[in-house]
Amino acid sequence: MFSRIRIKELRPINLEGGYLIDGFPSVGFTSAIATESMIQTSQFSLAGIIDSDSFPPISLVKDGRPNYPTRIFVNDDLKVSVFLSYLTLDESLHRIIAKTMLKWAKKQKIELIVSSMAVKSMEGVQGIIAVGNTDSARAKLKKSGLKILQHGTIPGIAGTLLNEGSISEQDVIVILFHSDGTGPDFRASAELCMAMSQLIPGTSCDIPLLQKEAEKAEISIKEADEGSRQVKDSIYR
């Protein structure tokens, strides 16, 4: 069944020449926690929502207000956008999510998409490692000082962004970090947030604030994940 992803922009957005961060969780919640922390540190505001009939029908209530679990945040001054999701999506949705992201990036004339992927084994590599899909993306990566992946396999949303982006000539960089996906990993969240700030000028990571926000974000993400599981169980029982 074809799953349509809907993006509704809530205000005018100007991101020409800017950046898009993929905040969909992969293994565990590190990607979502890192992007949530950057949003809290670098003055982002809500600019849109992402929804689909294939998403679990849940609302996240924060400070007494209902929220969609998948939203778009934008820092207008830095021209940086974030697709932040508290939903761990089924693999069947990964390709269409990536293609939707690429289509929106083209519409907004985004220069670089930054995604991330948790891996359980880094084969002796310490710290963060990354891969770029085009010559210009690899040049950005080299300039940032991050280690470059030479051989490996990247599945899911991140892998689709790399492949499809190379065809459409959209620069994509995927950051790989170590996580076993079992519980909170503040260190991985901090490393990922710092790596993203190396690639995206003007963004920053307040580490003490990040730890505080990571703890709050993890609770919200786990609640959303548990809520979506309960919805699926009730639907398919």
Image: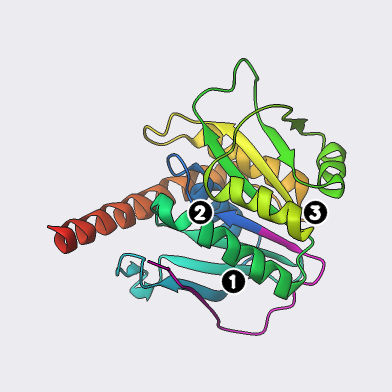
Q: Nearer the viewer, mark 1 or mark 2?
A: 2
Residues at discs 1 and 3 in contact (Cβ within 8 Å): no
Mark 3: which amino acid? Pro
Residue position for label 1: 45
Q: Nearer the viewer, mark 2 or mark 3?
A: 2
Mark 2: which amino acid? Phe
Report how far apart the C-alphas of labels 1 and 2 lie in the structure.
18 Å
- The answer to whether residue 1 is left or right of residue 146 is left
Question: Could you say which disc has been placed on residue 201 in the image?
Answer: 3
Residue position for label 2: 24
- The answer to whether residue 143 is left or right of residue 55 is right
Crowding around mark 3 (Cα neighbors within 10 Å: few <14, some 14 to 19, many 20+) is few
Helix, strand or loop for disc 1: strand
Q: Which residues are magenta?
A: 1-20
- Does label 2 or label 3 sit earlier along the sequence? 2
Q: Residue 88: within the magenta?
A: no
> What quarter of the picture does the N terminus occupy?
bottom left
